[in-house]
Each structure stands twice: as C-alpha cells, then as structure tokens.
Image: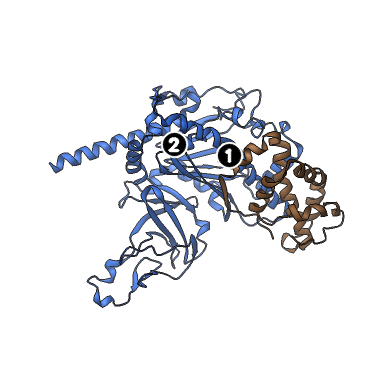
Chain colours: A blue, B brown
Amino acid sequence: MNAEANAVFRPPVDQTAWLGTDLIPAKAYYDPDHFELERKAIFMRSWIQIGHVCELPGPGSFIRRELEFAEASILIVRGKNDVIRAFHNACTHRATQLVSEEQGSTNAFICPYHMWNFGLDGQLRSAPEFENFFSSKKDCALKQVAVDICGGLIFLNLDPSPAQPLREFLGEHLVDRLEMAPCAKATAFSEYVYEIDANWKLDYDNFQESTHLRFIHPRTGAPSFIAENPFGHPESYGFHGPHRTQTFWPKVDMGTTSPMQRTLLEAGLKFAMEKGLIPNPTNREYYALFPNFFLLGSPSQHFSHTVYPLTARRSRGVVRLYWIGEAQSASEMLAREYAFLVARDIHSEDVGVIRAGQRGLNSGALEHIQFQLMESLCRHLYLVSNDLIEKYKDEQAAERERAQ
Amino acid sequence: MTLQSLPSGFETLAPFVETWAATTTVARARRRTDSTPTERQAFFEAAAPLLEPAMAYLDARRLADLDAGERQLLNLMMSLSHVQMAVEIHREMEPQHAAFREAMAITRSATDFG
C-alpha cells in the first residue's frame, strides 16, 4: 500500500486476513500456568535482546544482566580477541555469583568466596588448593550461554543448543534492515526502566496498536491525527515468521503543536539529516522481534523497548534511545534531552490503562478478549506464542511416551 | 548550585539558576516534578523567549569549550524543555502524568552536562 498515491487511510484487510478472527483466551494474559508454559516454550529457548555492543567498548568490558524468567544472572564479556561471550554468573566451584557490579572492565572474574580466577574466555585460570579437588581445570570453565549480535543489538539464548542461529531466526529481511538501522551505529544511549503490574504481552501490545493513541495521547500525539488518518494508524503491516513490522504513516501535522515543541522536535531531524540518516529504508519502520523487543528505525529517535516477563502479571520494561557519536553542539544536546523526555512522557500516559487492563483480567471473569483488524499485531503475537506452547506440549507428550 | 555569571544578554535568568540549572537529566526531571505550577510558569515565561537566542549563542561555540556560565545556560534550556511539556502540552493533566513518570526510573542519560 502506498499512502502517497492513496492518501486516505484504509485498514490493511488483505495483509491481515490470514490471521483469522477468533476470540482470544483471556487466560493467556493472567494465568500462572499459562505463563509457566510460555516461560519454558518461549523465553527459555528464544533469542532475547539484552543489550547493545556500545556497552562493551573494549576488551575486558562486561555487563551483567538479570533474567528473572530464568532466575539467571548472565555476564556478557568482550574478550581479548574482541569475541563477545556470555556466561552464567556462577562460580563452578560452589556456584557463588562472581560479579555484583552492573558493568565494568576487568582482566579476570575472581570469585569472592574462594578466589577461583576465570579468564575473559571463561576458562578457570587458577584456584587455591586446586590439587585437592577432583576435577581438571578444563572441566571447570564458566557455563557458557549462546550469544549473538545483529545490528549492534546483543541477543542471548538460554537453550543449551538453540534450534536456530540468531540470523536464521530473524530472517534475511530483518537482518538486512536491523543492520542498516541507525541503532546499528549507536555509540551511546539514554535509558529508563520500569516495572508494571501487567502480563508481558498486555504491556507489549500497547505498543502494537494505534487505536488508543487519540484517546490516551490526545495532546502528545496530536501531530499524528490528521483528517486523512484520524487515528494515526500505520500505513501497512508486515509479517516475517514470528516477527512483525509496521510502516508509519508518512505525514504528520506539526502545526497542531506549540512552536517551541516544533522547534525542539525538528532540531532532532536536522541532526539526523546532517549525519546522513535521512533517507534510510528504516526511517518509518517499526520492527517487533519475537518475543519481547521492538525497535523504531526513526531517524531522530532510535527507540528500543524490551519487555521482560517477571510473573504472569508483572513485567519489567527497558526503554532506550540510542545516539550515534557525542553531541556536537548545544542544540544537539538539547534535541537529545527533549527526544528522551518526550518518549518517557508519552509512555507515562499509557501506564494507567495498561495496569487497568491487568486488573480487569485477573478475576478470570472474562473468558475471552478480542482484537480488531487494527490490532492484528497483537493477534499475531498471541498466535505465534500459542503455536510454540502447543509444540512444546507435543514434545513433552512424546517424551513421556518414550519414557514409558 | 553556585551562581556563575550567565552570558551577557541572559542575566534575567539568574534568579532561576539555583533551581533549574541542574546538571543531569534525572535532576531536571525531578525539578519539573517537584515544582509547583506557579514555579514552572514563572520559569517558562522568563526562559521561553530566550530559547532561540540562547541556542544561537551556545551553538557559536564548541560544546567542550563552554565555560561554567555557558554550561548553566545550556542546562537551563534543557530544563526549559522539560517544563515546556508540563506547561504547554500536559497543562492541567501534569500532576496525573507526574505520578506515572515516577514509575519510570531514568537509569542512564547521554545528556548529563556538569
């Protein structure tokens, strides 16, 4: 669909018909048993976005990430040869966590308990009284976790042998786009983190549909609500295996906002232009990577959001605005500050309704919820998740049968 | 906050330096949330007409070379951008949004500028 040739919004009926029209079981959004299935069938075996290479600037740089859904603490490390590896943050002696800092730079990971000393490659280098143990050093390396990078983004997979490498999981189109998106070149970021009483899909779905915009963001979203497209809907949707995309509407009306806001927002575009980020095929794209990450290719706001599940009814979100290079001028600094605070401000408007959605679900009174055509991305996330759960159940059944 | 001399032409902002020339994004967001509507309005009215002249003045200099007073001017303008959202966009809804913003902790900023 081309909005310029066809300037009035029309729902993308043809793109979404294949998803069907079924009601959606409400249980998927509050039930602890369903959540446990998602945890095992999805989160313990999918590629999960956890950071960006700019956080590991040189050999010895490391970050520690807590993945509550796995009760795991993971160290991601850039080695001497620039190879990025990930390890469980647990000494192979008696499992003590090695690192309490969130990030840093080091030559070795040394266990505070009995001074076991591990290299950046995870190998055990030395341990007091090692001659009294009953293992060889090579069997005492840190437990490794699968890690891979695409477009500067770091992904982990907790499956000891992931079913697919990251790039195969993302598919050629998304790999290509992620690598050309501005975020791939980022050197810094601003970040805010929140916890919310909401199922991870309920929270994530808020960012997958546009109908709520004019009700929840009547002022902050005003430039998107134009006569040809009064809800500020996207121009089109795309489906790529378990992942999905939106292409935002090409036109906004900045005349609906204050002159100062207009100046501050347009400054961001000016710097993007100077950096050669416009035009870029990702400029109006939204990339939702299964299960819980999305990225905007927007030239002035390289915005990413990851929703980590904590329990069936609670999630943690990490939102980042990535930047390429240091700000070169006072105006560029101001434009970055403003883009970041506006993102947080707009997001804050969503918190109340997302929490209210969870409270409405928790009693179990509603057996179903429903998605309209313009909530097709939410439907797709549910369907993909449900397929993986069914597949997981089949595997478990087959395993039980073999055991008998 | 020590009062440095603001660049010539921006002296009228001196009474706002102590409250609003905060050096980190976290502090600027906090000042906005902690301020009264009257305080925000007074700062906005004094600073808004100076936004464009201030940025023209600062952009004529290298960011790394800004002196203490010039840095305070930039931090004032960054605070103005926070206050603008409250005064011009959220208006009477600002207190309600402030409560929700509190749930979103700023954990890193690329625009902290002491």
First in residue order: circle 2 vs circle 1: 2
Give the labeled residue for mark 1: A347
Of all chains, the one bearing label 2 is A
Q: Quadrant of the N terminus of chain A?
A: top right
Of all chains, the one bearing label 1 is A
- What's the distance in space between the residues labelled 2 and 1, CA to CA? 16 Å
Q: Residues within 10 Å of mark 1 (few under 14, many from 20)?
A: some
Q: Specify whether A88 is left or right of A151.
A: left
Residue A68 at x, y percent in the picture: 40, 49
Give the labeled residue for mark 2: A201
Task: Identify the secondary structure beneath mark 1.
Answer: helix
Instruction: Name the amino acid type tagged 1.
Output: His
Using the rendered view, name the quadrant where residue B99 is placed. top right
Residue that appears at 56% across and 42% down: A297
Residue lying furthest left: A404
Instruction: Name the amino acid type tagged 2.
Output: Lys
Q: Specify whether A282 is left or right of A135.
A: right
Task: Identify the secondary structure beneath mark 2.
Answer: helix
Residue B81 at x, y percent in the picture: 71, 45
Total marks placed: 2
Question: Does residue A103 sit above or below A292 in this rendering?
Answer: below
Question: Does residue A4 sit above or below A261 in this rendering?
Answer: above
